[in-house]
Image (cartoon, rainbow, N blue to C red):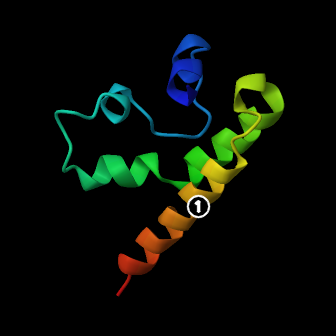
Amino acid sequence: MLYDIEQKEELRAGTKLTKRHVQFHNAKMNVRLAAQTLSESVADALCYLKNQNEHFSDVEPTAEFIRYINNDFDILNSR
């Protein structure tokens, strides 16, 4: 729904989501797409839309999960 809103309103909420992120079936093993989908900017965009759109009223647990995965990815990606 976040991607659809970004496309419909022709704006980006600080995310790098593209059609490839939503229709990922041809790129299932692409870590870059997964990392961008589960990024802090996506969590922030979801939290922003929580106040702007009634369809995003229950988004807080998803945003929290995305932040956990993003932080874990950053820890595992460090030296």
Camera sees residue 31: yes
Q: Residue at x 37, y 30 (%)?
A: 22
**Closer-to-camera residue (61/11):** 61
Q: Is residue 57 above or below residue 55?
A: below
Q: Quadrant of the N terminus?
A: top right
Position of residue 67 measured from the top left corner of the image (x, y, whole percent): 58, 61
Q: Alpha-carbon neighbours of circle 1 within 10 Å: few (<14), some, or many (≥20)?
A: some
Position of residue 29 measured from the top left corner of the image (x, y, whole percent): 18, 50
Asked whether, in this view, residue 28 is left or right of residue 13, the answer is left
Q: Quadrant of the C terminus?
A: bottom left
Camera sees residue 53: no
Kind of element beneath mark 1 = helix
Q: Is residue 26 above or below residue 31?
A: above
Q: Residue at x 30, y 31 (%)?
A: 20
Residue linked to disc 1? 67
**Residue 65 position by quadrant:** bottom right
Asked whether, in this view, residue 63 is left or right of residue 25, the answer is right
Q: Residue at x 78, y 24 (%)?
A: 54
**Closer-to-camera residue (54/2):** 54
The residue at the far top in this view is 8
Kindly identify the amino acid type of the residue bearing the numbered disc 1.
Answer: Arg
The residue at the far bottom in this view is 79
